[in-house]
Image: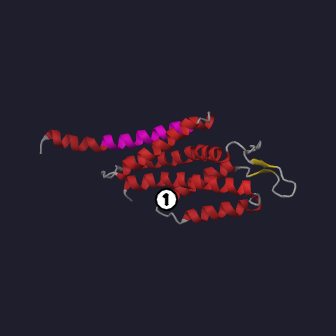
């Protein structure tokens, strides 16, 4: 074995993990920018970065160094939290085609006199979504995906009284599914990368 071969063998894993972290970092940057300045192309860029990173870690690779695992775990959690909200809003905008009026407190306005769920409903969805994605991503990262059922149950019970109107149910289901898929993908990124 030549010195060149030994050096190359030691450098390739470093380059590989640096590229994975850079791709995830680009996704985080795109997601962070779209929070302040909503742009669909930024949501698509963050989604593409997540997909590319997932493809990279599915390919055969050496296990990362412990420090890389920590950085990648924090980056996956950051991408989950920062990217999930814009992804949910993007999909909801496509699904509702801008026919739903947004409320002042982050909910949607339902104007039906025959329903107790009239006025602004689904308030606090952004904060609930953040906690939902943290819990979901952490559950997958820890190898305990069964905890996702608890997250969904708590969220559903908490919103039960607001789910009487069809428009509200649709937004709740779509938003929850997009948030869970995004968070699970971020957790899977870590699990696949580390081979745990």
Please identify the residue farthest to the top as the structure is shown. 37
How packed mark 1 is, by other alpha carbons closer than 10 Å (few <14, some 14-19, many 20 or more), is: many
Q: Position of residue 115 (x, y in %)?
A: 84, 58
- What colour scheme was applied to this rendering of the protein? secondary structure
**What residue is at 43 percent from the left and 52 percent from the top?**
190
Is residue 165 visible in this depiction of the protein?
Answer: yes
Q: Position of residue 105 (x, y in %)?
A: 75, 44
**What residue is at 62 percent from the left and 55 percent from the top?**
176
Q: In the figure, is residue 81 to the left or right of 142?
A: right
Magenta-drawn stretch, dominant element (helix, strand or loop) = helix
Q: What residue sits right under mark 1 in the picture?
A: 140
Q: Position of residue 163 (x, y in %)?
A: 74, 59
Q: Secondary structure at mark 1?
A: helix
Is residue 71 visible in this depiction of the protein?
Answer: no
Residue 11, image quadrant? top left
Q: Nearer the viewer, residue 142 or 31?
A: 31
**What residue is at 47 percent from the left and 57 percent from the top?**
141
Q: How many marks?
A: 1
Highlighted range, magenta: 14-32
**What residue is at 42 percent from the left and 44 percent from the top?**
52
Q: Nearer the viewer, residue 100 or 193?
A: 100
Q: Quadrant of the C terminus?
A: bottom left
Q: In the figure, is residue 8 to the left or right of 26?
A: left
């Amino acid at each position: 074995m030549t010195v060149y071969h030994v050096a190359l063998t030691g450098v390739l894993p470093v380059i590989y993990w640096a590229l994975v972290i850079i791709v995830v970092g680009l996704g985080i940057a795109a997601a962070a920018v779209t929070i302040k300045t909503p742009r669909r192309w930024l949501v698509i860029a963050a989604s593409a970065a997540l997909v590319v990173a997932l493809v990279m870690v599915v390919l055969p690779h050496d296990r990362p160094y412990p420090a890389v695992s920590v950085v990648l775990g924090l980056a996956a959690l950051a991408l989950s939290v920062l990217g999930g909200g814009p992804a949910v809003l993007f999909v909801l905008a496509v699904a509702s085609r801008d026919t739903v009026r947004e409320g002042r407190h982050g909910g949607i306005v339902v104007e039906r006199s025959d329903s107790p769920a009239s006025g602004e409903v689904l308030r606090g969805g952004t904060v609930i979504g953040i906690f939902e994605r943290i819990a979901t991503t952490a559950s997958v990262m820890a190898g305990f995906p069964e905890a996702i059922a608890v997250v969904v149950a708590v969220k559903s019970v908490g919103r039960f009284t607001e789910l009487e109107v069809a428009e509200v149910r649709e937004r709740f289901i779509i938003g929850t599914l997009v948030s869970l898929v995004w968070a699970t993908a971020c957790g899977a990124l870590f699990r696949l990368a580390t081979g745990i």
